[in-house]
Image (tube, grey):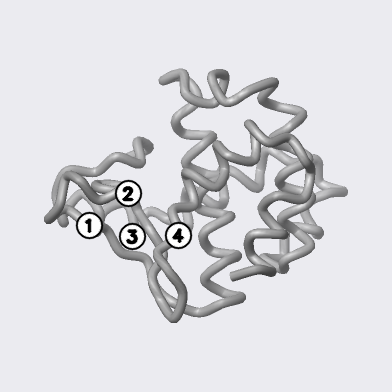
Amino acid sequence: MNNQTLTTRDDFQYWLASMDDFLEEFIAQFPAEDRHHLDYSPSSLDVVEKWILKTYPDTDDMLVPSESERVNGVACYVGETFRKTLGGKWDIRLDDPKFAYYSMPILTGAYDAECPLCLVTASADRRTGDFLRTVLENS
């Protein structure tokens, strides 16, 4: 399951159970000498964002269907970094189609819901190099 728009709770549970595989595939895309930086720390988000900006000239390039697996892996890494730093848990809202993150995996906790997929695409759009870490530090 590589699309982050899920339609059932079972789809979400399958996606969640596959998280380690998604993360492993994402991390494998980095050169061996860079992988040690991917330690789920806030500073690792700068390494990931640098990769995003190098890989995707703009948001449209991220949203083509052939990139869905890669983008899912990035979103999983970003989400896990937020979760490990801030706490919270993965969830999905399937009850309200008007909810901004309807049918997309989100993180919930002591902060407002965060959608890692939206954060990843926003980082490609804003192109600052530190957007993801800044959002995490301000959460």
CB within 8 Å, label 2 to label 4: no
Q: CA distance from mark 1 to mark 3?
A: 17 Å
According to the picture, the residue beneath numbered tag 1 turns out to be 93
Q: CA distance from mark 3 to mark 4?
A: 20 Å
Q: Quadrant of residue 41?
A: bottom right
Please state if 3 lies on the left or on the right of 72 as rendered. left
CB within 8 Å, label 1 to label 4: no
In the structure shown, which secondary structural element does the residue marked by tag 3 occupy?
A: helix
N-term-proximal mark, 3 vs 4: 3
Q: Nearer the viewer, mark 2 or mark 3?
A: 2
Which of 80 and 121 lies nearest the eye of the viewer?
A: 121
Q: Residue at x 68, y 36 (%)?
A: 126
In the structure shown, which secondary structural element does the residue marked by tag 1 occupy?
A: loop
Decide: is 72 above or below 21.
above
Q: Nearer the viewer, mark 1 or mark 3?
A: 1
N-term-proximal mark, 2 vs 3: 3
Q: CA distance from mark 2 to mark 4?
A: 9 Å
The image's mark for residue 17 is: 3
Q: Residue at x 50, y 79 (%)?
A: 87
Could you say where residue 79 lies in the image, as x and y percent from the top left?
Answer: 52, 59
Task: Locate the C terminus by quadrant.
Answer: bottom right
In the structure shown, which secondary structural element does the residue marked by tag 2 occupy?
A: loop
Q: Nearer the viewer, mark 3 or mark 4?
A: 4
Decide: is 5 above or below 112.
above
According to the picture, the residue beneath numbered tag 2 turns out to be 101
Q: CA distance from mark 2 to mark 3?
A: 20 Å
Q: Residue at x 54, y 26 (%)?
A: 62
N-term-proximal mark, 2 vs 4: 2
According to the picture, the residue beneath numbered tag 4 turns out to be 114
Q: Amino acid at mark 3?
A: Ala
